[in-house]
Amino acid sequence: MINEGWFTSKLQEWETPQDLFNALDSIFQFTLDPCASPINAKCEKYFTKEQDGLKQKWFGRVFVNPPFRDVGKWFEKTIKELRKKNCELVITLTPSRSTEAKYYQEYVLGFAHEIWLLTPRLHYTNPFDESKHRKKHSCVFGSMICLFKQEDRSLEYPIVKGVDWRELVKDHSNQKLTDFLGVESET
C-alpha cells in the first residue's frame, strides 16, 4: 500500500543527479537503464515507460532509478533478472523510507550485497524543465543505493553503511569496477 503523504509531487520521472550517476558509472560501467525516458536516460541503452522495463530482458550492468510508487516491482524484477543470469549486477537508487515494507524485507534485506544510506538528501531535477538552469528539488526523504550481484552473498545480511554521496562523487569518480565487489572490468 502506497502512502500518498510520502510524495510531494505527482511527477514520477525525476532525474538522477548527474554527478552522482557519473561517479557510479565510472565505478560500475553501466550498460542499461531499464526505467527511463529519452529525456532522462542515463545509459545509451534504455527502456522507456512505453517499452516497460519490467517486461524486458535486462543485460550487462544495470542502473535502476525507478518510479518511486513502484519500487517493489523493480526490486522483484532485479532479483528475477539476476537469478536468470541475464545481467551481472544491478545498482538501484531508491527512497530509504520503507524499511518495514514487504519488498524491502524480502528483496533488499534478502538479496542485496550492500546498502548505502545516502547523506545528505539528494536534489533531483525535473527532466521536463526546459529552462537553461533547471531548478533542483530536495527530496523530503532519504535515499539509498542497493548493490546486487548475480552470485549469492557471503554474509547472511547485506553490508549497510552510511555514505556521503558528495564524498562518493569526489573520492570514487576515478575508481574502476575491479575495485568494487570483485567484478571484472571489460576495460
Image: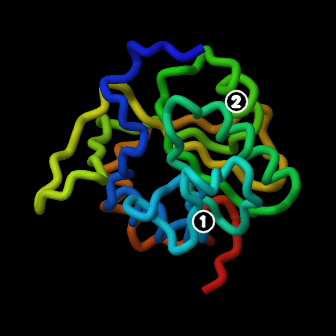
Residue lying at 88% horizontally and 55% vertically, measured from the top left:
84
Residue lying at 58% horizontally and 43% vertically, measured from the top left:
146
Residue 93 locus on image (x, y percent): 50, 44
Q: Quadrant of the C terminus?
A: bottom right
Residue tagged by mark 1? 32
Q: In the drawing, what numbered circle is on residue 135? A: none
- In the picture as drawn, the residue positioned furthest to the left comes out as 132
Q: In the drawing, what numbered circle is on residue 109? A: 2
Q: Nearer the viewer, residue 3 or 138?
A: 3
Residue lying at 75% horizontally and 26% vertically, measured from the top left:
106
1 in relation to 22, above or below: above
- In the picture as drawn, the residue positioned furthest to the bottom comes out as 187
- Cα distance between the residues tagged 1 and 2: 24 Å
Tell me the amino acid under the disc marked 2. Answer: Leu
Residue 50 locus on image (x, y percent): 58, 53
Query: Mark 2: which secondary structure?
Result: helix
Query: In the image, is 69 to the left or to the right of 148?
Result: left
Q: Indicate the quadrant where residue 136 lies.
A: top left
Query: In the image, is 98 to the left or to the right of 140?
Result: right
Dot 1, crowdedness within 10 Å: few (<14), some or many (≥20)? many
